[in-house]
């Protein structure tokens, strides 16, 4: 029985290590040990096993680790019927071609949003949207959509996050959420990134549950609020169409 517990603990630790790479592309042994709260010797043993199995690679010149090919092999076998990032990619590409701006897909994970898919604009000046990026829920059009169309209990949970900056006005944020629900979309102007704007709309699955937030973003010089407002009806319609694909 004790041996079984130890095996489960080792698996749990290995998964905690792999999850560190959701925040960084490459990490040193010291950085990993600090993030997971384990001794470097323990982390080294686990990393050696993960490297042997192809789940991580170590760069000998920098002595930093990156995710290995086995991760990508596993992701290639995700079912398109279950994974919105794969299922909706062709529709996102069409929307990108329609509006000629970067299109992103976000889901809520606890008190953060996670970019699970992105299609870059073909324009020379564009927003680069790395897939896998984790962002806070208190700024950005997609964040506000994910919070606005969540239930009251989930909203209370999100708004009670202690990491919110002191300058963030929760009461004003709640007022914004109601306005977003009424309008069906959200707009942000330089909230998270200087010179960047975006518009986002919710995607509901066939059961009526909030599945994701669909956003179009770009530089403020090309996408002022007036233009974002003209994009909003198109975005909401495409989000509705995408929702019909999600069971």
Image (cartoon, grey):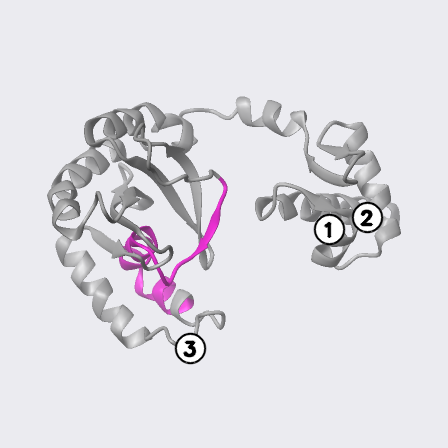
Q: Secondary structure at mark 2?
A: helix
- CA–CA distance between discs 2 and 3? 36 Å
Task: Confirm whether residue 247 shows in the render.
Answer: no
Q: Secondary structure at mark 1?
A: helix
Of the two numbered discs 2 and 3 in the rendering, the one whose residue sits closer to the viewer:
3
Mark 1 nearby-residue class (10 Å; few <14, some 14–19, many ≥20): many
In the image, is 172 to the left or to the right of 136?
left
Mark 2 in CB contact with mark 1 (< 8 angstroms): yes
In the image, is 6 to the left or to the right of 114?
right
Q: Earlier in the sequence, mark 2 or mark 1?
A: 1
Mark 2 nearby-residue class (10 Å; few <14, some 14–19, many ≥20): many
Q: Secondary structure at mark 3?
A: loop
Q: Residue 133, percent across and down?
A: 48, 45
Q: Residue 180, percent across and down?
A: 19, 58
- CA–CA distance between discs 2 and 1? 8 Å
Residue name at image x 31 percent, y 52 percent = 195
Q: Earlier in the sequence, mark 3 or mark 1?
A: 1
* Residue annotated with mark 3: 166
Q: Residue 110, percent across and down?
A: 47, 56
Q: Nearest the camera: 228 or 122?
A: 122
**Screen quadrant of the C terminus:** top left
Q: Up-down: is 54 above or below 189?
A: above
Q: Nearest the camera: 175 or 24?
A: 24
Of the two numbered discs 2 and 1 in the rendering, the one whose residue sits closer to the viewer:
1
Q: Residue 228, percent across and down?
A: 17, 46
* Residue annotated with mark 2: 43
Please identify the quarter of the rendering in which residue 246 is found. top left
Residue name at image x 30 percent, y 30 percent = 123
Please identify the quarter of the rendering in which residue 63 is found. top right
Look at the image and give the residue range highlighted in magenta.
132-157
* Residue annotated with mark 1: 32
């Amino acid at each position: 029985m004790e041996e079984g517990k130890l095996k489960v603990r080792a698996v749990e630790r290995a998964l905690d290590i792999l999850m560190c790479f959701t925040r960084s592309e490459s990490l040193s042994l010291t950085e990993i040990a600090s993030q997971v709260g384990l001794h470097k010797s323990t982390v080294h043993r686990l990393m050696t096993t993960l490297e042997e199995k192809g789940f991580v690679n170590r760069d000998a010149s920098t002595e930093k680790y990156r995710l290995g090919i086995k991760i990508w092999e596993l992701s290639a076998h995700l079912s398109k019927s279950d994974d919105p990032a794969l299922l909706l990619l062709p529709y996102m590409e069409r929307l990108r071609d329609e509006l000629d701006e970067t299109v992103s897909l976000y889901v809520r994970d606890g008190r953060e949003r996670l970019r699970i898919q992105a299609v870059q604009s073909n324009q020379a000046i564009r927003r680069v949207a790395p897939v896998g990026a984790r962002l806070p829920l208190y700024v950005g059009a997609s964040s506000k959509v994910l919070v606005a169309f969540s239930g009251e209990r989930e909203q209370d949970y999100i708004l009670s996050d202690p990491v919110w900056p002191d300058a963030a006005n929760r009461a004003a944020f709640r007022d914004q959420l109601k306005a977003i629900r009424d309008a069906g979309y959200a707009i942000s102007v330089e909230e998270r990134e200087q010179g960047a704007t975006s518009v986002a709309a919710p995607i509901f699955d066939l059961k009526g549950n909030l599945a994701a937030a669909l956003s179009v973003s770009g530089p403020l010089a090309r996408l002022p609020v007036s233009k974002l407002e003209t994009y909003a009806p198109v975005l909401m319609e495409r989000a509705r169409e995408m929702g019909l694909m999600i069971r």
